[in-house]
Image (cartoon, coloured by chain):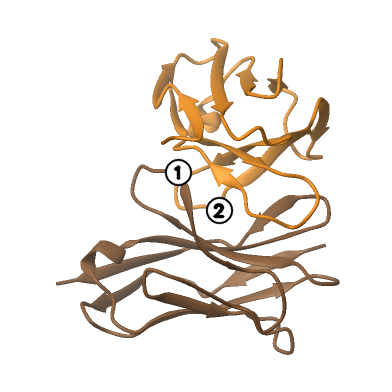
Amino acid sequence: GNSVTQMEGPVTLSEEAFLTINCTYTATGYPSLFWYVQYPGEGLQLLLKATKADDKGSNKGFEATYRKETTSFHLEKGSVQVSDSAVYFCALIQGAQKLVFGQGTRLTINP
Amino acid sequence: DAMVIQNPRYQVTQFGKPVTLSCSQTLNHNVMYWYQQKSSQAPKLLFHYYDKDFNNEADTPDNFQSRRPNTSFCFLDIRSPGLGDAAMYLCATGHSGANEKLFFGSGTQLSVL
């Protein structure tokens, strides 16, 4: 079945540092890929998405590129802020409309 | 404007006392989902409705039931909550067809005493 694997957290960085959160997936065919963010005590918000190979999703300074050759969708940001502290989930959806999540990566940004 | 609304935001119930969580949507999406998210874990799909068709995940306990009286509303019923059912419950909606994103509500945090 489909699955998503994220780098294990927690991740702690200083403000203005470069961020990478790795995500790889297993799926047949061409799923759509997503990054969702969850702030403390809140539901999930879509951060960005990509629907086909080589697409780059971007939002709020975050980027991720759909790489079919490496089955990856790594999340990056050039300069993180304290307000980026949250849990980040990589996810995919395909066919039967079931969103499959990775295990989540908790990110903490220190001033 | 909130598009997927979950009520209540926080729910406290007693061990074994039935509880119902509600979800409404203004998006007119034909697919609605219920996820369970325990602390520091990924959301886990319990079931979903494709229009009126109910789709239960194989490992969802019988203790969890759902109702969808119309397109806009969906309910999660926990018949006899146990301590292990304390979690955040997330409702989401989506449009069938293309692999599009899901829209999530803010969740209901359920505590079982």
Q: Residue at x 68, y 55 (%)?
A: B100
| Residue B113 visible somewhere in the drawing | no
| The color chain B is rendered in | orange
Q: Residue at x 58, y 39 (%)?
A: B36
What is the secondary structure assignment of the residue under circle 1?
Answer: loop
Tell which chain the image draws in brown. A
| Residue A75 visible somewhere in the drawing | yes
Q: Quadrant of the N terminus of chain A?
A: bottom right
Q: Quadrant of the C terminus of chain A?
A: bottom left
Of A8 and A34, nearer the camera is A34
**Position of residue B33 in the picture relative to residue A59 (left or right):** right
Chain for mark 2?
B
Q: Residue at x 66, y 84 (%)?
A: A54
Q: Which mark is residue B42?
A: 2
Q: Which three-letter amino acid code belongs to the residue tagged 2?
A: Ala
Work out whether A50 lies above or below B70: below
Q: Residue at x 74, y 58 (%)?
A: B99
Quarter of the rendering containing residue B21: top right
Chain for mark 1?
A
Q: Which mark is residue A43?
A: 1
Q: Which three-letter amino acid code belongs to the residue tagged 1?
A: Gly
